[in-house]
Image: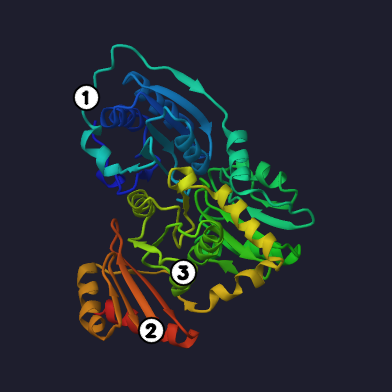
Amino acid sequence: MKFPSQIFRSYDIRGLLDEVTPELAKNVGYVLIKKTQAKTVIAGRDMRATSPELLKAAIQGLIEAGANVIDIGFCTTSLYNFCISSIDHAEAGIMITASHNPAEYNGMKFSYGNGQPISGKEIRDAVEEDFVPAGSLGSVTKIDPINDYVEKCLTVSGAPDLSGKKIVVDYGNGAGAITVRPLLQKMNVEVIELYAEPDASFPNHESNPVKEETLVDIKAAILREKADLGIALDGDADRIMFIDNEGVTLRGDLLVPLLAKELRSHEPEAKIVITVNQSWTSFEEIAACGAPAIVCPNGRTNVIATMKKENADFGGEVSGHMMYKEFADLESVDYTIVRTLSVWQKSGLVFADLVRHLRQYHNSGEVNLEIHDKDGAIKKLEELYASKATVVNRIDGIRCEFDHDWWFIARLSNTEPILRLTVEAVSEGLMREKVEELVVIVSEK
């Protein structure tokens, strides 16, 4: 059977509902065992409309290939990551999810038992082959790991008692409430919940907290309720954004140094991995509390691979993926919540005052430009700016820094005719000026 080639991506499989079918899921189960030789596999799913049937089909493929399956059912990606990292005999995993994508999408992601991701492109080469079932079927064991996961998040770093504090949480109609709700209850915090009911149609807003337009409701609720801060999650709860008590978002690359500094306060030699598109703040704050950060290309798989290679303790992205050695170098939004709230409690400050110094530079955020000659655009930027820059980094597109006035990074999308541009400067006026300048240059034919 043929499957659309475009759904097999660098990090996972993701496509429209009629492209990601039970037939595909079953075949993927076969391929996963062929590739990993795993005898025991973790399997879970998010709340999307087709996820139950996709998980059922994937499990059928896994057991027909002879593997034993630990079925964790409806879960978040963070909970799935916990199972991968804590169940010793698990040698691979499959999670049915399209993460933050709109309702008309679904997908799958996979990993080895050590947490190392397996790309959709690695699966593609064998997924259309005919398979012969193993001599005997594997078994299926259902477990509920939520309590164990919540306890680990609370005990590894120590849970703050937040009696008297008020937090707004926007679940975006995703899966996050199944773990975040009991987690926050154990910290005695008053919680105002938005869109906690899982709903695959995402009726209130896209479940993608990186987009500022999805944070309108939580910001209004924070101000209306006089809350201490807000937490927004994506659909499968592997990405997180914090919003302060003044209704201002804390980008992922500003959360990273806050957590890195706390980690190094008791582990001075801790290694930190960051992506090349992060703010000067991230680079400077991390270097100021020990060794400079280890820098890698953008993308969660790059962060995970670099953490494993360097035996790092913590890594994070602008988009809100926060990875920890304690979870096999994978994401945990719940652990991120505990650590962030612990830093906040110990500071004695209101949340806005705790993070205000992290916003010292003016950052454009990621500007996505449709450019058909992407390589030509990067070459043009190289020719015009590299020789004038004081620092040039080419590990992911091109990043040029100009003294300590401003910098830009231009990166290419792997799957679309999109150039991703970020500019940061010491003043808002300079930042806007440089964004306009660069957009004109890369848009010229």
Task: Please name the residue shown 56% across and 46% down the image.
Answer: 174
Residue 99 place in picture, x, y as percent: 46, 47
Q: Taking 227 as reference, is 40 above or below it?
A: above
Task: Please name the residue shown 42% across and 31% down the image.
Answer: 54
Q: Nearer the viewer, residue 294 or 233?
A: 294
Q: How many marks?
A: 3
Q: Which residue is mark 2?
A: 434
Q: Pointers 2 and 1 in contact (CB under 8 A)? A: no
Residue type, numbered disc 2: Lys
Q: Quadrant of residue 132?
A: top left
Q: Earlier in the sequence, mark 2 or mark 1?
A: 1
Residue 236 place in picture, x, y as percent: 51, 45
Q: Pointers 3 and 2 in contact (CB under 8 A)? A: no
Residue 374 place in picture, x, y as percent: 24, 68
Q: Which residue is mark 3?
A: 282
Q: Taking 86 as reference, is 282 above or below it?
A: below
Give the secondary structure at mark 3.
helix
